Image (tube, coloured by chain):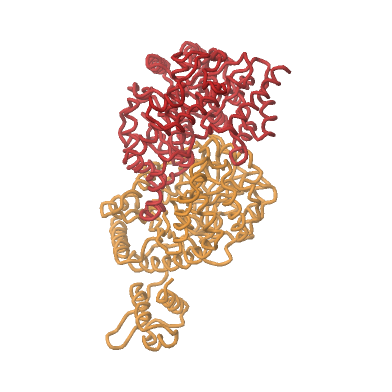
Chain colours: A orange, B red
């Protein structure tokens, strides 16, 4: 972050904590500049950021004042999905969302892409350029089935942060986290099996289950603490469920973080019912608090957790570098990797291995955590400002997604279609349910820039929702 | 090819055609040099190549003479696999072969890697370096689900050479041909289905079928003209076969090419029995004769052929760029691509698109055709020289694989294990059969260099086979 961004974040926190009260006059530009040892223009830029966020208002010839604020919208309640296994629907809607990726004019609030414009990624370029110049043989040859050893060693080091101690031999490189989940599921399940998921749950995972003919049992989930263990237990008693897909460290779309006690409880439950846990840790490194939460895998003693992750959200989607820690399913996972894709691209694996080894990854991830935190705050402010009253908004503790719940009766699929014409893409909530629930919800990608253009888009989105609410 | 290689090939052809007879004296170095307008040392180098191939023998103070030659070993007979659907076995043996890729000291005659040391690949590097420097956003972003449009346009142009006219919208980019076949099979078949294959057939395809729980019906196949249509018809009448996997343009491992009439006949058969054809065209561009053979897809009128291919053999395996032309299964293939891997790596797609667009691909492929033809000839000579009598060897019309059939009773799995200790890796024939047939066969990768080290390895291989034959 630049100096002025740092200062703006600090001031925003003080306002949030009530150290500066609503209506109170803020320190003068000159005073702040002296207090923090920064230039006048840095303070002016910081105040400009806060003004854009509508946290402060300027008054001619008097300075800046803390703005009066709407109350924070409440967090959505625990979900109540259908309590039986269902087939996933909505592929056409997901395809529309995926196609929007190629439309360069579209403001894509619906997609899951991270920010890839940070200077902390530069060493990754340098490494790629070096590989192209000096390691042509490595780059052009078949990769080892398990993936490059150099990279597996680095991943094994990184995973210690989440409490997961794993040998590089027990890591299998995949084509992104999506490819990891796909291989994990193919290794354990067959068509007709039932798998439990959090509800709402990432549409990519849902469509993956649909592709393989697996039925989905949606489990009530709390937007702050994750899946309901009680509801899962009830489901396990009633249905022959094969496994459960969990995103315990910053879920998608709600950003929930499962407390350690609940992680242990769910593992004990899995053991009692002899089911498999597919742990999706793709956002785990983007949890705001440091140190990052422990993985369920870190408590796993009998190898029933298949941990899936990737650098798609933490570094860049185009790398397509993910991995599985397959536990007791290692042999089967290796075979299914061979069946599903053969081997993976070596270049990006080698580049990532060097990026981590030389300390650039940690520098980058520290920056991105702050970056996304600021983005989440700003987008939350914009939503508070432009969206009608009577909505609920999540308060994720990491990642860069917001989940907005509108009153029942508002149909976000219709609203999304209208917004598409204005070149604004959103992800209607129904994509996050196997049975088409959450039509009145939407997920917003806050990794998008904080410029005027995007603020206006959020304003238009708010307006469309206003109209839809009045009509409903 | 260098001048001396050209000259050596020319002379070898003349010997092969009987223009120089066995025992006849060859022109003097000086005469040849004048006749072909090349230097004395070029002629000397060419003669050295022919001497290494044991096509000619030097006689002190008299010059070079055409060497007496063993008779060409016959081509193997049409195969006779088990005539019922079976489950694929031998995964552990395939895994051993795959693991050998990472052993840099191993002379890997068992793998399928092409030669990647040619200077005609240089423009591919330049393009990659350019992308890393100037297209960082493209490289780091999610790819379109279908793959980069630029590349699909170039592939659609290339495919005209095989008579296949296809719109870029009807091409789906995959992670290599292996990934293409995998998605094609997942799109059409479910566990328990039966799929017919040529016999012998590539072990990767077999293990893919095993992974997805698909049973295999091996069909008798001729090493020159491909699968027996009569035998396939008989099988279709007896079993509920879902589809057939064919490699009609230079099969793996035997290098057969199916004549156009048979391609049409098999398509008609597929229509009558309403089955799907999975056409694997990975070696199609490496057929020696120009223009390359037509694809079955080029005769397809009702979209029942799913053509799968890649640049793995024609350019480089590390690219992992393949594609499907899915015909009537387009929607299902797109969904299964999303389920199986999400999206593919953009960098290599963009680099390949530019490589083709700027004419470098055609230059490279012309070179590789000649290169592999020469390698096949030389390796055939070496085998003739070092292997015992009583063997059969294929005469592939493209690609770079030789299939050697030894007398019944020789167990190539045992021989392979012994050779591994000498750092020589071979592919025992049983890997190419679902039911472990062809234990007395092996496949040899002739893309490997023509140096003394590799000649010695073939000699050791021959010696091991000699001993095994005596013991059997």
B360 to A449, vertically: above or below:
above
* Residue at left offset 44%, top offset 14%: B19
Extreme right residue here? B471
Of residues B353 and B90, which is closer to you in this image?
Answer: B353
Residue B300 is situated, as x and y percent measured from the top left of the image, at 35, 22
Percent from the top left, x then y, of residue B437? 62, 19
In this image, B376 relative to B417: left or right? left
Q: Which of B173 and B134 is in front in this view?
A: B134
Q: Does B383 sit left or right of A42 as displayed?
A: right
Against B222, residue B207 (above or below) is below
Residue A110 locus on image (x, y percent)? 38, 53
Quadrant of the snapshot with the N terminus of chain B: top left
In this view of the protein, can residue A387 be seen by the observer?
Answer: yes
Nearest the viewer among A197 and A452 is: A452
| Residue B59, placed above or below residue A327 | above
Q: Residue at x 47, y 19 (%)?
A: B26
Reply above or below: B369 against B264.
below
Q: Seen in the image, is A333 located left or right of residue A76?
A: right
Total marks in image? 0
Q: Quadrant of the C terminus of chain B?
A: top right
Quick one: A450 or B438, which is closer to the camera? B438
Q: Can residue B216 be seen in this view?
A: no
* Horizontal and vertical percent position of residue B125: 41, 46
- Outermost residue, front direction? B61
Residue B290 located left or right of residue B110: left
């Amino acid at each position: 972050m630049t100096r002025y961004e740092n200062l703006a974040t600090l001031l925003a926190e003080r306002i949030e904590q009530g150290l500066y009260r609503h209506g109170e006059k803020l320190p003068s530009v000159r005073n702040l500049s002296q207090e923090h040892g920064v230039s006048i223009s840095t303070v002016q830029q910081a105040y400009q950021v806060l003004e854009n966020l509508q946290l402060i208002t300027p008054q001619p010839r008097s300075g800046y004042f803390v703005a009066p604020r709407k109350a924070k919208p409440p967090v959505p309640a625990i979900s109540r999905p259908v309590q039986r296994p269902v087939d996933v629907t909505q592929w056409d809607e997901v395809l529309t969302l995926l196609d929007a990726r190629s439309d360069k004019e579209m403001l894509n609030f619906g997609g899951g892409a991270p920010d890839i414009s940070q200077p902390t990624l530069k060493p990754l370029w340098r490494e790629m350029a070096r590989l192209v110049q000096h390691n042509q043989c490595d780059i052009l040859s078949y990769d080892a089935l398990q993936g490059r050893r150099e990279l597996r060693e680095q991943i094994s080091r990184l995973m210690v942060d989440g409490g997961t101690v794993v040998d590089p031999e027990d890591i299998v490189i995949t084509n992104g986290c999506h490819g990891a989940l796909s291989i994990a599921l193919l290794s354990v399940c067959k068509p007709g099996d039932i798998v439990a998921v959090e509800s709402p749950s990432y549409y990519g995972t849902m469509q993956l289950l649909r592709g393989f003919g697996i039925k989905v049992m949606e489990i009530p989930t709390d937007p702050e603490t994750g899946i309901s263990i009680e509801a899962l237990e009830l489901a396990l008693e009633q249905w022959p469920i094969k496994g459960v897909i969990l995103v315990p460290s910053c879920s998608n779309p709600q950003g929930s973080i499962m407390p350690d006690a609940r992680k242990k409880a769910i593992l004990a439950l899995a053991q009692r019912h002899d089911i498999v846990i597919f742990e999706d840790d793709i956002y785990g490194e983007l949890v705001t608090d440091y140190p990052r939460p422990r993985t369920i895998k870190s408590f796993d003693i009998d190898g029933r957790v298949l941990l899936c992750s990737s650098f798609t959200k933490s570094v860049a989607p185009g790398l397509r570098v993910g991995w599985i820690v397959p536990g007791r399913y290692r042999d089967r996972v290796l075979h299914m990797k061979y069946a599903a894709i053969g081997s993976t691209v070596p270049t990006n694996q080698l580049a990532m291995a060097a990026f981590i080894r030389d300390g650039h990854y940690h520098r980058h991830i520290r920056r991105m955590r702050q970056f996304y935190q600021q983005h989440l705050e700003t987008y939350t402010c914009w939503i508070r400002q432009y969206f009608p009253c009577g909505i609920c908004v999540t308060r994720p503790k990491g990642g860069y997604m917001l989940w907005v719940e509108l009153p029942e009766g508002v149909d976000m699929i219709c609203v999304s279609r209208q917004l598409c014409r204005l070149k604004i893409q959103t992800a209607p909530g129904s994509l996050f349910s196997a049975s088409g629930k959450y039509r009145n919800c939407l997920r917003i990608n806050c990794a998008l820039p904080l410029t005027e253009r995007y603020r206006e888009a959020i304003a238009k989105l708010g307006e469309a929702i206003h109209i839809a609410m009045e009509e409903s």
